[in-house]
Image (cartoon, rainbow, N blue to C red):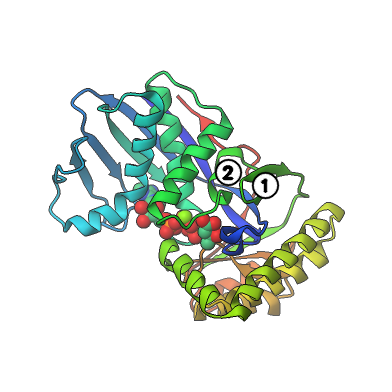
Amino acid sequence: MTRSSAPGKVYLFGEHAVVYGEPAVPCAIERRARVDARRRDDGKLRVNSEDLSLNGFTVEYGANPDDQPDVDVPQSLVSAAMGYVDGAIEQVREVTGEADVGFDVTIESDIPLGAGLGSSAAVVVAAIDAATRELGVTLDTDELAERAFQTEYAVQDGQASRADTFCSATGGAVRVEGDDCRSIEAPDLPIVIGFDGGAGDTGELVAGVRGLREEYEFAADTVEAIGDVVRNGEQALADGDIEELGRLMDFNHGLLAALGVSSRSLDAMVWAARDAEAYGAKLTGAGGGGCIVALDPTDETETALSFTPGCEEAFRAELAEEGVKRLE
Ligand SMILES: Nc1ncnc2c1ncn2[C@@H]1O[C@H](COP(=O)(O)OP(=O)(O)OP(=O)(O)O)[C@@H](O)[C@H]1O
Ligand SMILES: C[C@@](O)(CCO)CC(=O)[O-]
Ligand SMILES: [Mg+2]
């Protein structure tokens, strides 16, 4: 058996716009998905995840995509929940040339699902890494990130950037613009996260922005304006100017809200952070519900969030220097 873990992430800047070629700066955080993979010679894939929305179910099915899973819930639910793991195993079969290999996969994750902290990318990166190593193949980080991206791209219907997967595979702070992905220096940031307990569907939210962008020129301009905010943000990061970083995060949130991907509870948490004099606050990831990220070296934002109706949990996040970790 092999075991790998990979971190989740927050976006300092640039989600959504990054899908259309603008730059983005995500930053890995110490919340991880751990995946165990054990080879099976009967070609079946068995996935056990305690924290899927189907309430901790186990699915078992064959390598043949027409095989029905052995589970008592509608197939559409299973496909929606399993898409990323399935896609990851497809990549493993392709890269190792073992088209009929099966696996027992066990996932343990402390990244909430669909909440903007990159649970899908972390699960996919850790699953591809563990399952390829189980077959005696170790991918370098760039290839691992690329294979993980191909998985997200397929599951999100061709609407995905390399940002989440590259960040999860590499760790640290990264900059992604199209297929140009690199690590960047970042100061130690006082990151506070507020979580509303909810989730948004990344594929649907991305499709919504795409539609707006096609319909209205000002929506396309908004996407470009996010790119400008990111470029300014990169300068602020390089200068270690945290006040400017915060101001730009506030601006970025406003533009995301204009694109329709914020929500009442995300806005409430952003305002609570601003009222608590955080340097800045914005939603992170696809939006629709889930998490905000704020910068505040004091306890004020965390305390204010814990009293904000709609906020279920507030916590500090450390930057994860290391991306994928090989545990066994
Ligand atoms: N612990 C897990 N076990 C199995 N699958 C998981 C797990 N965590 C996440 N996933 C997969 O990832 C999907 C959620 O991915 P989605 O991209 O919608 O949200 P996210 O990655 O958490 O947030 P964002 O993309 O906004 O950062 C789940 O529906 C499931 O398919
Ligand atoms: C919304 C998005 O930009 C980030 C989701 O975490 C989608 C993507 O980059 O694939
Ligand atoms: Mg995701």
Q: Which picture quadrant has residue 33?
A: top left
Q: Residue at x 12, y 53 (%)?
A: 72
Give the structural element (helix, strand or loop) at label 2: helix
Q: Residue under circle 1?
A: 174
Q: CA distance from mark 2 to mark 1?
A: 8 Å
State yes or no: Cβ of the residue under disc 1 lies below 8 Å from any atom of ligand 2: no
Q: Is residue 187 left or right of residue 11?
A: right
Judging depth in this view, the residue of 254 and 119 nearest the camera is: 254
Q: Residue under circle 2?
A: 166
**Amino acid tagged 1:** Val
**Amino acid tagged 2:** Phe
Q: Is residue 77 left or right of residue 219?
A: left
User: Are the residues at dot 2 and dot 1 in contact (C-beta closer than 8 Å)?
Assistant: yes
Q: Is residue 147 above or below residue 270?
A: above
Does residue 169 show up?
Answer: yes
State yes or no: Cβ of the residue under disc 2 lies below 8 Å from any atom of ligand 2: no
> Which quadrant: the N terminus?
top left
Q: Residue at x 56, y 27 (%)?
A: 140
